[in-house]
Image: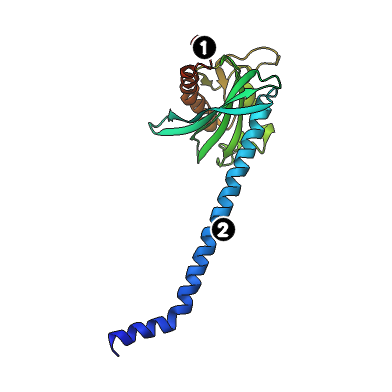
Amino acid sequence: MSRVSKIRYFFEQSWLLIVASFIFGLLIAVTNASLDTRIKQNLKNKLNKLMKELISDANEFKIVADQAEIMGDKGKVVRTDIYQAFDANESSVGFAFEAVGAGFADKIKIVIAVDGKFERFFGFKVLSSSETPGFGSKIAEDDPASNEDLVDEFKDAPAGEVKLVRTGKRREDKSEANDDEIIAITGATVSSEAVVRIFNTYTEQVRAKLQEKGLIGNGR
């Protein structure tokens, strides 16, 4: 059998497989594109929901720093949008931004919110986390009861560098301001460390971005 005959024979025998593979690949590409759009929209909806929960007076959120460059804790540049929150009277009531860092098993994505003067944290919410059960699952957003202690540690704490402590007395009077010492969750020290590291990586850099834009003062 000649070379030309072999090629013709190959296509005669495999054309259906080639066409099916092409169609199958095309369907996968279309499906992935459709799901990617839906996933991004779901994440955006969740981000808006969490920002609203953190800044309850907010009526609207506007991006004031689009894809701001942040130097990550491992020396890699990451980008995040910084939002300014406005109430019904269009007065600024705070800022919020997405922050990401390495946890025990995977990346932890959180939403951090601060007041309008960048003086106090409103707190944080978990946007996504795939932490290992028993190590980091206690900060998962779908189990708010388990992360309540850690979340509460950041509420009304000074918006600056915070430090993790293993033990300490949690505040009983919620009207009192927190200090800069964050008490780790029992059984989830590694993930507690990750959240503190994320805060310390982003806070001062975001502050600098907002100061450059004249949205907050230069004082502390």
Q: How is the image coloured?
A: rainbow
Q: Is residue 15 left or right of residue 83?
A: left
Residue labelled with disc 1: 217
Q: Is residue 147 visible?
A: no
Residue labelled with disc 2: 31
Q: Residue at x 50, y 38 (%)?
A: 107
Tag 2: amino acid: Thr
Q: Position of residue 214 (x, y in %)?
A: 50, 16
Tag 1: amino acid: Gly
Residue 41 against residue 74 in the figure, above or below: below
Q: Residue at x 39, y 34 (%)?
A: 76
Q: Position of residue 163 (x, y in %)?
A: 51, 19
Q: Quadrant of the N terminus?
A: bottom left
Q: Position of residue 72 (x, y in %)?
A: 43, 30
Residue 153 against residue 37 in the figure, above or below: above
Q: Is residue 128 visible?
A: yes
Number of dots carrying numbers: 2
Q: Residues within 10 Å of mark 2 (few under 14, many from 20)?
A: few
Q: Is residue 19 left or right of residue 168?
A: left
Q: Residue at x 61, y 43 (%)?
A: 41
